């Protein structure tokens, strides 16, 4: 049965190919051979038929992926498959890793340049979709959805946890400095630094403004296009939060500290929830206007959710809209990792810096939580573990904190508390992005 | 005349951005903290005075008074409501009603135009 199927498929393939070759040879024979005698034509055409057919196959082959495959493409395709595997097998942010993984494969199918195929060729469909990344359109839309999903009540109930979100931003600035020392110029370093904010949309937004390969530096050189590496680093480390954070948490907190139980947050009135997005929008954007697209959309989405009158809009923003944008963003960011642009020394450096930035951000949050505990009364002490949720990576880092808390004490539920620094981290990293943008943009 | 430094020391500028950036981020979130700690109760109080409604007093909003009603209770209640609304489906009554669907008239299926009309 199987053999029969194979034979049939080979035959059908031949049937399909034959007319193409036949037409090809006919036209070529007519154009190349001047008619002298009938016999000659017959003879040479039968000879040339094989030759032409062979040439046709050769030409076809030269357009296939097999002929154009470079080592880099194959490595990147393998990475894409690993991403998909990680997403499916270990459930590490599958909503991101599977689109990105597929995108990586799409972007690294080898092709002949000049046919409007690749993501970097103007006029190709992928290029049009990529437009939303290059111009920073997708990130604010994602933030709108995040705003419509997020419940800020734990933050309103316990505003001092907001500082943990700020403390984790030390990762951003430390990475920025590290990138400068490694020889990146200022805008590039700023874009790399934001990986420490552990916020994919923010990272894409900032890198599309600073390291987009278009801007020209004061000394006349063009900045490098680092959107692909930065986005991939940010998203892959975000997916790896459950792997990166726990060892650092264990290292920096004592068993006793991990056992601290926090007072359950008070109930927050609807009025407070409605005032929050408006006031927070005003305060944060007045301080850091460059973060307006991100913070504006974030708090707008939250207002849609909390106003109680626009449930329809909030519902669309947090389901359909964010899904659509996530699909487009994931695939195009993945596809932007075309090997000849992606596999460089810079990308490797960015990946290294990204890992360090996550570590520093986590440490910043944890240590600041311990520092705050020095000043708090004994019944108001905070569990330092929640400091680690100050790196945004919503809601994965909060979940990791919760899981670690449960490991120390089966009945200590930290999720609610961890959400506060978690969402504060989103606000903090958006503000940090705004600051970097206003300094270097 | 505009004088511009041709060579900017990147590292030192990096430190400047590091310090100011961190300060601004902390400042911004500190401001938010302060507002929600102190400003918001005042705001709600003013709102209460303006509307002169039967709104809660300012001290009712403070966490100390609300201690009885914690987030855990809220979570328990909302879980119960959620379960109730979700499980409702299991307790449906067994009476079946058949809804008469009105068919639209279409000449294509009309018996008047059938082929067997003239069989007599």
Image (cartoon, coloured by chain):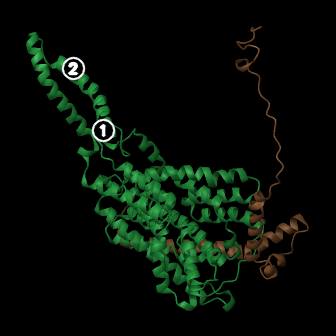
Chain colours: A green, B brown
Residue sitting at 21 percent across and 31 percent down?
A: A56
Numbered badge on residue A26: 2
- Looking at marks 1 and 2 on the same chain, the residue that comes earlier in the sequence is marked by 2
Q: Chain of mark 1?
A: A
Marks 1 and 2 in Cβ contact (< 8 Å): no
Q: Is residue B6 visible?
A: no
Residue sitting at 61 percent across and 56 percent down?
A: A145
- Residue closer to the observer: A124 or A427: A124
Say which of marks 1 and 2 sits in front. Answer: 2
* Image quarter hosting the C terminus of chain A: bottom left
Report which quarter residue A164 is drawn in. Answer: bottom right
Numbered badge on residue A102: none
- Binning the other alpha carbons within 10 Å of mark 2 as few (below 14), some (14 to 19) or many (20 upward) gives some
Coordinates of residue A365 in the picture (x, y in percent): 53, 78
* Image quarter hosting the N terminus of chain A: top left
- Binning the other alpha carbons within 10 Å of mark 1 as few (below 14), some (14 to 19) or many (20 upward) gives few
Confirm whether circles 1 and 2 share one chain.
Answer: yes
Coordinates of residue A311 in the picture (x, y in percent): 72, 53
**A334 above or below B65?**
above
- What secondary structure is marked by label 2? helix
Coordinates of residue A158 in the picture (x, y in percent): 68, 77
- Residue closer to the observer: A20 or A146: A20
Q: Give the alpha-carbon distance from disc 1 to disc 2, as whole Å.
A: 27 Å
Q: Is residue A177 visible?
A: yes
**A111 above or below A223?**
above
Report which quarter residue A409 is drawn in. Answer: bottom right
Q: Chain of mark 2?
A: A
Q: Which residue is mark 1?
A: A114
Question: In the figure, is residue A119 to the left or right of B90?
Answer: left
């Amino acid at each position: 049965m199987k053999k029969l199927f194979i034979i049939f498929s080979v035959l059908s393939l031949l049937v399909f190919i034959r007319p193409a070759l036949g037409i090809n040879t006919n036209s070529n024979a007519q154009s190349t051979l001047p008619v002298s005698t009938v016999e000659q034509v017959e003879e040479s055409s039968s000879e040339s038929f094989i030759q032409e057919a062979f040439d046709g196959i050769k030409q076809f082959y030269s357009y296939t992926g097999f002929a154009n495959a470079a080592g880099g493409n194959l490595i990147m395709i393998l990475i894409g498959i690993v991403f998909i595997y990680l997403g499916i097998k270990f459930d590490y942010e599958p909503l991101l890793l599977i689109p990105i993984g597929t995108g990586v494969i799409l972007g690294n199918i080898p092709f002949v340049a000049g046919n409007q195929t690749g993501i970097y060729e103007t006029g190709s469909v992928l290029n049009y979709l990529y437009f939303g990344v290059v111009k920073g359109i997708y990130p604010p839309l994602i933030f709108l959805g995040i705003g419509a999903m997020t419940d800020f009540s734990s933050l309103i109930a316990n505003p001092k946890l907001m500082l943990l979100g700020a403390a984790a931003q030390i990762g951003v600035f430390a990475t920025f400095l590290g990138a400068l020392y490694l020889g990146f110029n200022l805008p590039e370093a700023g874009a790399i630094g934001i990986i420490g904010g552990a916020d994919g949309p923010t990272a894409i937004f900032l890198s599309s403004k600073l390291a987009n390969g278009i801007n020209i530096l004061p000394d006349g050189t063009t900045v490098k296009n680092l959107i692909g590496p930065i986005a991939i680093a940010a998203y892959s480390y975000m997916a790896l939060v459950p792997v990166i954070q726990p060892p650092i948490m264990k290292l920096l907190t004592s068993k006793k500290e991990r056992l601290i139980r926090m007072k359950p947050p008070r109930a927050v009135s609807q009025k407070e929830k409605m005032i929050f997005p408006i006031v927070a929008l005003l305060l944060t954007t007045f301080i850091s206007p460059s973060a307006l697209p991100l913070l504006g959309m974030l708090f707008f989405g939250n207002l849609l959710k909390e106003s109680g009158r626009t449930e329809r809009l909030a519902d669309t923003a947090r389901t359909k809209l964010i899904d659509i944008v996530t699909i487009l963003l994931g695939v195009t960011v993945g596809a932007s990792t075309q090997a000849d642009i992606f596999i460089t020394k810079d990308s490797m450096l960015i990946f290294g810096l990204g890992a360090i930035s996550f570590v520093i951000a986590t440490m910043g949050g944890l240590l600041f939580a311990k520092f705050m505990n020095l000043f708090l009364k004994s019944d108001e002490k905070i569990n330092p573990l929640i400091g680690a949720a100050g790196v945004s990576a919503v809601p994965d880092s909060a979940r990791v904190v919760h899981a670690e808390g449960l490991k120390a004490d089966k009945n200590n539920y930290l999720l609610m508390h961890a959400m506060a620094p978690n969402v504060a981290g989103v606000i903090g990293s958006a503000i940090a992005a705004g600051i970097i943008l206003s300094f270097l943009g | 005349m505009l004088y511009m430094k041709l060579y900017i020391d990147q590292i030192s500028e990096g430190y400047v951005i590091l310090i100011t950036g961190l300060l601004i981020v902390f400042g911004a979130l500190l401001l938010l903290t302060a507002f929600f700690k102190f400003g918001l109760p005042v705001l709600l109080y003013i709102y209460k005075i303006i509307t002169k409604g039967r709104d809660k007093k300012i001290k009712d909003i403070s966490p100390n008074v609300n201690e009885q009603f914690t987030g855990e209770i809220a979570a328990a209640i909302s879980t119960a409501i959620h379960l109730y609304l979700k499980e409702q489906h299991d307790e449906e009554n067994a009476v079946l009603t058949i809804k008469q669907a009105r068919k639209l008239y279409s000449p294509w299926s009309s018996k008047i135009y059938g082929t067997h009309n003239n069989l007599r």
